[in-house]
Image (cartoon, grey):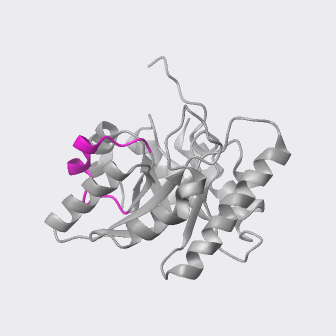
């Protein structure tokens, strides 16, 4: 996709979410940049995305130095042995999905004199194919990780099931919003509910998400044949 189209797509999404969510919160637009060129990503940055996000460490390392100034997030499943390549360079980890990973981010952050911002990933659809903590354990995990040196819990992330059942999806997003609101009452600095991708971000924003991770709607369908 040419850079002019990327620019127009970002502007269209920004216009669409400009009024915020029903809770009066601004919606943060994160460009999911998997398999995209630095040129295309820079076009999205120039168009005004709030952050860019990779989901593979190798791609992050290849493109990091080529990008214009913009907050950099990580949204993919993260192996503990790859955390060392990201600490100090990532502004927000969306996919803190297990204690082992949280401990390693915390350990390397403390070692480097840093505090890393994370979102706790919740497996809201209880799907075997997806990572994340069970919804039932979310507040306990939130309390525990919030007290971990080197970490700052900024909220939660979830991926909805691939379903056309809007009633089900609405119920799940409402559950995540309820969890987010409970956590906000317990601690300051809980600002983000990252929920919604290209196929479902409109529904998620309608039900209280304030951060969306958009890839194909910005950049077009990914070409996996390359």
What residue appears at the point 57 percent right and 77 percent down from the top-left corner?
184
Instruction: Residue lying at the far left in this picture: please name it.
Output: 111
Q: Position of residue 167 (x, y in %)?
A: 85, 47
Residue 176 vs 214, above or below: the answer is below
| 81 magenta-colored | yes
Residue 139 at least partly seen: yes
Residue 70 located within the stretch drawn in magenta: no
Which stretch is magenta? 76-91
> In the orientation shown, which residue stands out farthest toward the top?
225
Q: Is residue 135 left or right of residue 152?
A: right
Asked whether the viewer can see residue 212, the reply is no
In depth, the one of 226 and 128 nearer the eye is 128
Examine the image and state in which quarter residue 177 appears. Answer: bottom right
Residue 42 location in percent, x, y?
43, 51
Left or right, 214 with reference to 148: right
Q: Which SS type dominates the magenta stretch?
A: loop
Q: In the rendered image, which quarter is residue 181 located in?
A: bottom right
Going 78% across and 61% down the picture, which residue do you hit? 206
Q: Residue 97: percent from the left, percent from the top?
A: 44, 49
Q: In which quadrant of the rendered image does the C terminus lie?
A: top left
At horizontal 48% and vertical 79% (from top left) the residue drawn is 189
Could you say which is closer to the camera, residue 62 or residue 188? 188
């Amino acid at each position: 996709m040419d850079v002019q189209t990327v620019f127009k797509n970002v502007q269209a999404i920004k216009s669409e979410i400009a009024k915020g969510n029903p809770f009066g919160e601004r919606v943060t637009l994160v460009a999911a940049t998997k398999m995209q060129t630095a040129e295309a990503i820079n076009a999205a940055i120039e168009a005004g995305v709030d952050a860019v996000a990779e989901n593979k460490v190798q791609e992050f390392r290849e493109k990091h130095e080529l990008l214009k100034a913009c907050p950099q997030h990580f949204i993919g499943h993260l192996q503990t042995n790859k955390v060392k390549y990201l600490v100090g360079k990532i502004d927000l980890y969306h996919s803190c999905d297990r204690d082992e990973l949280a401990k390693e981010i915390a350990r390397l952050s403390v070692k480097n004199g840093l505090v890393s911002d994370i979102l706790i990933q919740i497996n809201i659809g209880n799907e075997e194919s997806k990572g994340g903590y069970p919804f039932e354990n979310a507040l306990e995990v939130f309390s525990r990780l919030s007290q971990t040196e080197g970490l700052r819990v900024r909220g939660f992330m979830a991926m909805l099931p691939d379903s056309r059942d809007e009633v089900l999806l609405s119920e799940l997003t409402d559950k995540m919003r309820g969890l987010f609101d409970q956590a906000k009452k317990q601690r300051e600095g809980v600002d983000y509910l990252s929920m919604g991708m290209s196929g479902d971000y409109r529904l998620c924003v309608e039900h209280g998400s304030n951060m969306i991770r958009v890839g194909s709607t910005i950049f077009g369908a990914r070409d996996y044949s390359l």
